[in-house]
Amino acid sequence: MATAKVERYQKKTGHELALDFSEELLRYLYEHDGFCDLGDKSPSEEISARFGVSKKVFKQAVSDLYKRKLITIASDGLHLTN
């Protein structure tokens, strides 16, 4: 019982997970010529299949990168800024 309680507190919060995924998404963009064809309108199944995260975490990560001016959001997907 005590072990389960400790493990629960060791799990990352949604915000921490999104920040971690922000860095993964940024790496993905660098490795794919600065482009990702997924966006906030993409089906959650596609996001999960490609990145293994929920649509909510994906959108939080996109928001984080956008606020940091590292990406732009276009109708065809995400682009690294110059």
Image: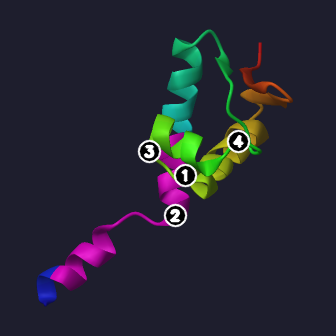
Q: What residue type is labelled 1?
A: Ala
Label 1 SS = helix
Q: Callout 3: 10 Å neighbours few (<14), some, many (20+)?
A: few
Relative to 3, does residue 13 appear above or below in the rendering? above
Asked whether the residues under the numbered discs 1 and 2 touch, taking CB atoms below 8 Å apart as contact, a structural biologist would say: yes
Spatial separation of the CA atoms under disc 4 and disc 2:
20 Å
Image colouring: rainbow
Marks 4 and 1: in contact by CB < 8 Å? no
Q: Does the magenta stretch include residue 19?
A: yes
Q: Mark 2 points at which residue?
A: 14
Q: Label 1: how many residues lie within 10 Å, few (<14), some (14-19) or many (20+)?
A: many
| Residue beneath disc 3 | 52
Q: Marks 1/4: CA distance?
A: 17 Å
**Residue 81 occupies which quadrant of the picture?**
top right
Residue denoted by label 4: 42
- Taking the spot 67% from the left edge, 33% from the top edge, the residue there is 38
- Provide residue 54's location: percent of width, then percent of height: 54, 54
Q: Do the residues labelled 1 and 3 touch (CB within 8 Å)?
A: no
Horizontally, residue 35 falls left or right of residue 1, namely right
Provide the residue span drawn in magenta: 4-21
Mark 2 packing: few (<14 Cα in 10 Å), some, or many (20+)?
Answer: few
Badge 4 density bin: few <14, some 14–19, many ≥20, Cα 10 Å: few
Residue under pointer 1: 18
Q: In which quarter of the image is the N terminus?
A: bottom left
- Looking at the figure, which quarter contains the C terminus? top right
For the view shown, which residue lies furthest in the right direction?
A: 75
Residue occupying the point 49% across, 49% down: 53
Secondary structure, magenta segment, majority class:
helix
Q: Gap between marks 1 and 3, in whole Å?
A: 12 Å
